[in-house]
Image (tube, helix red, strand yellow):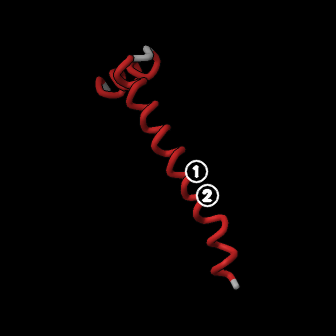
Amino acid sequence: METLNAAWGLMTGFDPALTGIVGLSMRVSLSAVFFGLLIGSPLGPALAI
């Protein structure tokens, strides 16, 4: 239970280290989605033919 309380405290306390990690994770994920869309959009219909 202490672990859950500590995790909840980090999430609600806006810990700068946690905020940085979450921000970096979001940037990496969104850039992967963007490049996947950029490559997959023209490639998908070309392979469907």
Q: Can you tell which quarter of the image residue 38 is in? A: bottom right
- The reply to whether the C-beta atoms of the residues labelled 2 and 1 are less than 8 Å apart is yes
20 vs 35, nearest the viewer:
35
Q: Residue 45 carries which label?
A: none
The amino acid marked with disc number 2 is Leu
The amino acid marked with disc number 1 is Phe
Q: Residue 34 carries which label?
A: 1
Residue at 38% over, 25% down: 18
In the rendered structure, the answer to whether residue 36 lies left or right of residue 49 reads left
Q: Which part of the image, by quadrant, shows the N terminus?
A: top left
The image position of residue 45, as x and y in percent, is 69, 75
Circle 2 crowding by C-alpha within 10 Å: few under 14, some 14–19, many from 20: few
From this view, report whether residue 40 is shown above or below residue 13: below
Residue at 58% over, 63% down: 39
Residue at 29% over, 23% down: 2
The image position of residue 36, as x and y in percent, is 55, 58
In the rendered structure, the answer to whether residue 10 lies left or right of residue 49 reads left
Residue at image mark 2: 37
28 vs 2, nearest the viewer:
28
Circle 1 crowding by C-alpha within 10 Å: few under 14, some 14–19, many from 20: few
Q: Which part of the image, by quadrant, shows the C terminus?
A: bottom right
Tag 1 secondary structure: helix
Q: What's the CA distance linking mark 2 and mark 1?
A: 5 Å
Residue at 43% over, 38% down: 25
26 vs 40, nearest the viewer:
40
